[in-house]
Image (spheres, rainbow, N blue to C red):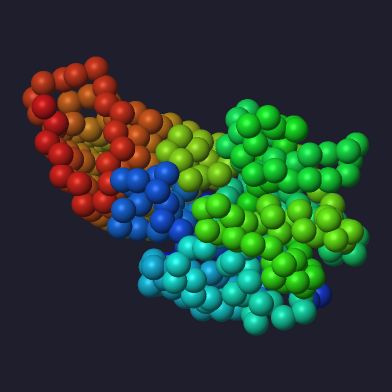
Amino acid sequence: MPLNSIERSGERMADQPRQRNLKGLLLAGGKGTRLRPFTYTGTKQLVPIANKPILFYAIEQLAANGIADIGIVVGDTKDQVVAAVGDGSQFGVSVTYIDQPVPLGIAHAVKISEEFIGNSPFVLFLGDNFLKEGISRYVEQFTNGGHDSLVLLSPVSDPQNFGIAEMEGERLVRVVEKPQHPPSNLAVIGIYFFNAKVFDAIRSIQPSARGELEITDTIQRLIDDGLDVRSEAIAGRWIDTGKHDDLLEANHLILEDLQPALIGSHDEASRVEGRVVLQEGAEVVNSRIQGPAIIGERTRIVNSYIGPFTSIYHDCLVADTEISGSVVLEHTRIEQVGHRIEHSLIGRNVELHGHERRPHGYTLILGDFSKLHMP
């Protein structure tokens, strides 16, 4: 899958020196249950944000910091990840795939990657995490600081649902998984820096009550063993894209910075307003596109309105329909829907047909291969 023309999030893909011995480890397994039915037939890390798979943003952020040796831990959707990422050459990196047949926890994914990591320090990046401003400052902090670990934190409104940091001043002293009485509102997000000492810590912990090796237990072991574990509250926007609203929010954030590029075509009867990307082979006929919005390769928009903060992926058809603030995946046909579709996620190979009646509006979450005739 070729890279598209969207400005890359947070960091430019300029030539960067290779970070000495620093490797990248991306997690791209898991079932994506919180995004169902959107992820029944596809991996959550390949759901696109602004027409680019979430996982690609993480790879690009690593590459932008000279981290060119990347391992990707994969599960039962391995074939999809391999088809999308390949050997990494499209990003200027080298990719090694590491099989995790059963999802037994983040720390387990690290454990089975020991042969790939060796004695190198590394960045652990959950593939469905989105950090708009990138990781450059944290790479520099870790590589220059000589720490055993650097744990990135972000304030959250619902700390009971996260691994939460307990602080003494600026020092991280404890990590608690989904506490009933949170010691702070600082969540441990899905981006971590470790050196090879982490493998001894993982070997010394036991599976949790849910049968998984927890990364929070691993971090706590490093702290308890007196190692140099630092934490940093991130300055920018972090989104865990594992839920529908969060994915739409991430799409919104990327499109805010969209640089217009009208590579595809639009006829004289159409109006293309604001920051709009028409990717190669896209065709707009007698329609209005109001940016920021992106229309994918070989997608046709006919007699329709595409509103702000909408991403429509490749090889779709939208005809006689209004869509705004939504994400539509590839090979989907949406025709003659009577009124505007808003704040919706529509999967791959969906067929959505309307009716002559005109309701006030629809909000939809449609999984792949859905077929729906609107009443």
Q: Is residue 136 left or right of residue 113?
A: right
Across and down, in percent, residue 374 comes to: 14, 31
Q: Quadrant of the C terminus?
A: top left
**In the image, what residue occupies the spot 40% across and 45% down?**
35
Q: State the quadrant of the N terminus.
A: bottom left
Which residue lies at the image location 56% right of the left edge and 78% below the top edge? 96
* Residue 250 drawn above or below residue 265: above
Total label count? 0
Front-lying residue, 365 or 262: 365
Q: Position of residue 39 (x, y in %)?
A: 35, 52
Q: Position of residue 223 (x, y in %)?
A: 83, 55
| 322 relative to 203, above or below | above
Query: Residue 279 or 256: which is nearer the viewer?
Result: 256
At 22% from the left edge and 24% from the top edge, which residue is drawn? 339
Residue furthest to the left in view is 356
The picture quadrant where one finds residue 258 is top right
Q: Is residue 366 left or right of residue 98?
A: left
Quadrant in the rendering for residue 172? top right
Q: Residue at x 52, y 76 (%)?
A: 97
Q: Is residue 184 visible?
A: yes
| Residue 314, position as x, y percentages in the image | 33, 55
Residue 298 in view: no
